[in-house]
Image (cartoon, grey):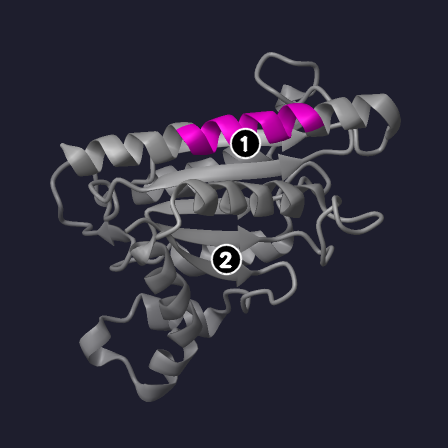
Amino acid sequence: MTRLLHIDSSARSGGSDRQPHGSHSRRLSARFVQRWRELDPGAEVVVRDVGLHPPTPVTGGWIHAAFTPEAKREAWMRDTLAESDRLIDELLAADVIVAGVPMYNFGMPAQFKAWIDNVVRVGRTFGFDRSREGEPYWPLLADAGKRLVLLSSRGDYGYGAGERLEAMNHVEPGVLTPMRYLGITQSHSVAIEYDEFGGERLQASIERAEGEVDALVGRLVGEGEVRAAA
């Protein structure tokens, strides 16, 4: 059984296909999950809406607790890390992470950054040993076979590789870098552009992105069936 972790981080509550001025990233993430369920009805989906229910930002107490060996943690430390533990448990259980992450001022929403800060944690998702020969840090999820699907939206256009605003796109790099640090190296990205332009260009971008989502779901579900039969 495939497990999907469906994360939305838009501050808007509904998809642009359902609400005026709705979220394009929610539209794409909902479509991805819907298409997956159509092709794989037995899939389990866990929903984590950090856009409407943001994780608690990391504090000094959180850092103190996270870097204290588990056996030496006091009760307040365990309480401080409880939310982080829940978010990490969801991540560890997922085969596919479907993340709706719109571009806000050239980067990811603060709500999604708070999620990243809670799941990038020593001893749980990455290892650290200052006495280790060579690299003192190493990923703990490298052999888990997880895939990340990053579904975004942008007001302008041209943020893709080799395009006019590539250097100003800090969404994909900002998300993929910490996820690869944990060992999640298989990733796919789809984005809607032209939101601030509207009209035919926006509609064409939506149609293109939805087509890419449908094709990606078909490919990933197909690959999963091949692996299961092997």
Instruction: Please determine whether, in this image, residue 125 is positioned above or below residue 174.
Output: below
The picture places residue 208, in percent across and down from the top left corner, at: 65, 23
Kindly indicate the quadrant of the structure image that contains residue 12. bottom right
Magenta stretch prevailing secondary structure: helix
Instruction: Please determine whether, in this image, residue 208 is positioned above or below residue 134.
Output: above
Tell which circle, 2 or 1, labels the residue nearer the N-terminal end: 2
Q: CA distance from mark 2 to mark 1?
A: 24 Å
Task: Locate the C terminus and report the quarter of the image it occupies.
Answer: top left
The picture places residue 228, in percent across and down from the top left corner, at: 20, 38
Q: Residue at x 70, y 41 (%)?
A: 24
Q: Residue at x 57, y 17 (%)?
A: 161
Dot 2 amino acid type: Trp
Viewer-nearest residue: 192 or 31: 31
The reply to whether discs 2 and 1 touch (Cβ–Cβ < 8 Å) is no
The picture places residue 1, in percent across and down from the top left corner, at: 28, 51
Number of residues whose C-alpha sits closer than 10 Å to that of mark 1, classed few (under 14), some (14–19) or many (20 or more)? many
Residue 115: give its label: 2
Q: Label 2's element?
A: helix
Magenta-highlighted residues: 207-218
Q: Label 1's element?
A: helix
Mark in front: 2 vs 1? 1
Q: In the image, 136: left or right of 58? A: left
The total of numbered circles placed on residues is 2
Residue 100 sits inside the magenta stretch:
no
Q: In the image, 112: left or right of 118? A: right
Residue at the spot of label 1:
213
Determine the residue located farthest toward the bottom in the rendered image.
75
Q: Can I make out residue 186 in this image?
A: no
Q: Can I make out residue 219 in this image?
A: yes
Q: In the image, 101: left or right of 17? A: left
